[in-house]
Image (cartoon, rainbow, N blue to C red):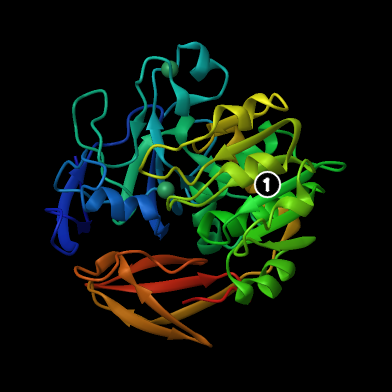
Amino acid sequence: MIKTHGYAAHSATTTLQPFDYEHREPGPKDVHIGIEFCGICHSDIHQARNEWGNAIYPMVPGHEIVGTVKQVGAEVTKFKVGDRAAIGCMVDSCRTCASCKAGEEQYCDNGAVVWTYNAKDKNGNLTFGGYGESIVADESFVLKVPGNLDPAATAPLLCAGITTYSPLKHWKAGPGKKVGVIGLGGLGHMALKFSHAFGATTVQFTTSVSKVEDAKKLGADEVILTKEPNWHAPHAGTFDFILDCVSAEHDLTPYMALLKRDGTLCTVGIPSTPVAIHAFSVAIGRKTFAGSAIGGIKEKDTAGQVRGSFHAPILCGVVSSFSVRSQRIRLGAYDLQLALWDGDGDGLPPDGATGVYREDGDRMTARLHVEKGIQLG
Ligand SMILES: [Zn+2]
Ligand SMILES: [Zn+2]
């Protein structure tokens, strides 16, 4: 076993604490990665606080992992020591079912996905994620990181990025298509950038006047404010595809009216309460309400390359060290609450902010990536 060190949640109500643990020695097909960066995903917070009811403690969260290969097994072909490598939400699956064979491991028909943390592997050992110093995984679930990508800025692609990339590709966002994005937060701003990069006419929906200019800077061809009653009427029947990136409860009826015949509205925000849709709103126009979850391993490799090729502007700031507790941090014009370690606040990182941390002795150095221009509350 390899001894390592990270930060673990030990209960739903305590902050993350320094934690020593062990993971397996690399087997013939395994890659041992020294973790350099890990994105902070909302689902880390949900799971650390047992908000999905599936928490296994101690829990080392983190599934947007970027690091450098330290060791490879004898049969590893994709990586060599010193390569940059990444791990997303999964570290294994059954690999034999139709979905796994189709490269859609996240939908494994046998329900055998091994999640990067808060799960048990095939040997019954608890998996530990990216808020640690190192990780071992089979090379089939490890991704290459293109050399032109900033490794820290790559981390959020591993979950938030692929979650928006995959449905946009599946529903063929591209030239001649009109795509709507609901919400301009962690998921929404990535959807906006990908859709714009794919060449679709991309429209941002937002309730906030202050986000209009920011959405345009990020690639929106048009921004539609959704506050006034009947806001949707002038745009009815004009959208091919709408990606819903909002996790809070909201009314979908006006958005269904925006779709063309055979159009699709897909949720990736996945609200925790059941979604109500009037049957007529899908029946008239043969419309589809759909959902999508992360993406397959091959798709993730491609998403990284796409991201590498369009170089969307990202404002990166390295901020001062902070202890493993809640802390407000000022970065340029933005006042950010690093809420992952916040035991009493609202517990969510601000919209549009992606925190990436690197361990630095017994402290963590945060590297905050703020999409340029997004207004943070
Ligand atoms: Zn995630
Ligand atoms: Zn499978």
Placement of 346 over or under 174, stated as above or below: below
**Residue ranking furthest to the right:** 176
Placement of 81 over or under 170, stated as above or below: below
Which residue, given by chain and number where applicable, does mark 1 sit on? 305
Quadrant of the rendered image containing residue 135: top left
Decide if residue 86 is on the left or right side of residue 361.
right
Residue 62 visible in image: no
**Residue ranking furthest to the front:** 229
Decide if residue 209 is on the left or right side of residue 8.
right
Decide if residue 50 is on the left or right side of residue 352.
left
**Residue ranking furthest to the top:** 97
State whether label 1 is within 8 Å of ligand 1. no
Position of residue 98 measured from the top left corner of the image (x, y, whole percent): 51, 12
Residue 61 visible in image: yes
Q: Secondary structure at mark 1?
A: helix
The amino acid sitting under disc 1 is: Gln
Position of residue 59 measured from the top left corner of the image (x, y, whole percent): 20, 48
Q: Residues within 10 Å of mark 1 (few under 14, many from 20)?
A: some
Report the front residue among 147 and 122. 122
Placement of 325 over or under 86, stated as above or below: below
Quadrant of the rendered image containing residue 23: top left
Ligand 2 lies in quarter: top left
